[in-house]
Image (tube, rainbow, N blue to C red):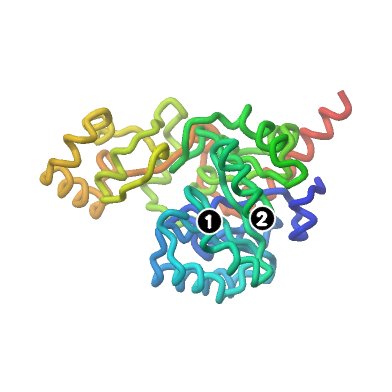
Amino acid sequence: MKTSFTERFALSYPIMLAPMGGVSGGALAAAVSNAGGLGMVGGGYGDLQWMKRELELAVAGTRRPWGVGLITWKATREAVALALSYEPHVFFFSFGDASPYADAVKAQRCALVCQVQDLHGARAAQALGADFIVAQGAEAGGHGAVRATLPLVPAVADAVAPLPVLAAGGIGDGRGLAAALALGACGAVIGTRYCATREALLHPLAAQLLIEADGDHTQRTAVFDIARGYDWPRPYTGRALRNRFVERWHGREQALAADAAALEGYRAAQQRGNFDEALVWGGEVVDLISSVEPAATLTERIGREAADRLRRLGAA
C-alpha cells in the first residue's frame, strides 16, 4: 500500500495515530511508529509539563518518524516552540487557524498537517501551505463538526487536489482503512480504536467502557466542555459515551453553566474516575473494539487487513 503519505515518511502502513490529548502519549506514539505507522503525541490544550514528559518518551522510544498535535485555538507560541525543540517530523493542527504557527513549522522542515471539517477549512489549509490535510467526519470521537466522513473525504480530495488528504472519523479496522483509500485518501487517522491499547494514557475503566459500548451509545454534546471549563468555539462539539451526566444536562447547557454545585460535582466525579458522570470520549467505531491489546499488534493487523481487502476487491 504505497501512497504519498507512506512514501513521505517511509511507513509500512498508511496509518496515523490521532493526536488525542491526554491519551496519545509518548509511549503510544512510539509504539505506532515502531510498528510502521505514524505515531503522534497529543499535546491537547498545551500543558507544557505534560508535553515535555511525553515528547521525551517519544524521542527515546523510536527512531522512526513521529509527530505532535495541538488544539489550534488553544495553542501558544511557547507550546509550539517546545514541541518543535524535540524535532518532530509532523505537526498536526486542528480546530482553528494555524497561520500564526505555520512559518515556524515550515522553517524546521516539519510537515504541516491541518485537520478540517468542511470544504472552507480545506481550502484555507491549502492556501496556508499545508503538506497534508485531514478530512475529519462527525463519526469521530472527541471534538469535531457535522459533516460525515464518507461524503466529506472525496469532496475535500477533489477540492484540494493534488494536495494529499487523510481520512478521519469512524475508521477502526482494515476495512475502514481500505475504504478511506478508495475514497481518494492517502491514509487514515485513527483515534478511538487506539484508546483501547496497552500504551494509551486512558483509565482502565474508561477503556473497558469503550469495549462494552456500541456506536448508538455515543453522542455529540457540549456538556463536558462546559463542565471542564473549556469555551470551545462553534461549530465544534465532542462525541463521547452517553452517561448519566449527558442524559441530565444535554439540551440544558445554560443551566449547567450556571449551576456551581453541578460543576463541582462533575470535577469530583472526574477525580474519582466515576464514569457514570465523568467523560469518556469515543467515536461511533466503538462497535469494533473488543479488547485492549498492544498498539503494535493493532497497527499491523489493520494494515494487513486493509491490504488483503484491497487485493480481494482488485481481483473481483
Residue at 57%, 38% (x, y): give it. Answer: 120
Image quarter where the N terminus lies is top right
Asked if disc 1 and disc 2 are in contact, CB closer than 8 Å, the reply is: no
Mark 1 or mark 2, which has the lower sequence index? 1
Q: Is residue 172 above or below residue 148?
A: below
Q: Looking at the figure, which quarter contains the C terminus? A: top right
| Total numbered circles | 2
Taking the spot 54% from the left edge, 38% from the top edge, the residue there is 117
Which x, y percent locates residue 279?
A: 33, 44
Residue 251 is situated, as x and y percent measured from the top left of the image, at 26, 28
Residue 140, horizontal then vertical, whole percent: 51, 38
Image check: 171 left or right of 310? left
Secondary structure at numbered mark 1 = loop
Report crowding for label 2: few under 14, some 14 to 19, many 20 or more residues within 10 A (C-alpha). some
Q: To which residue does mark 2 refer?
A: 129
Residue plotted at (68% across, 58% down):
35
Q: Is residue 37 above or below residue 59?
A: above
Mark 1 residue type: Ala
Which residue is the extreme one toward the left? 261
Crowd band around label 1 with a 10 angstrom C-alpha radius: few (<14), some (14–19), many (20+): many
Residue 98 badge:
1
Q: Residue furthest right?
A: 315
In the image: residue 149, left or right of residue 315: left
Which residue is at 47% across, 55% downward?
72
Left or right of 23: which side holds 190?
right
The residues tagged by marks 1 and 2 sit, at their Cα atoms, a distance apart of 10 Å
Position of 58 compared to 278: left or right?
Answer: right
The amino acid marked with disc number 2 is Gly
Q: Nearer the viewer, residue 131 or 39?
A: 131
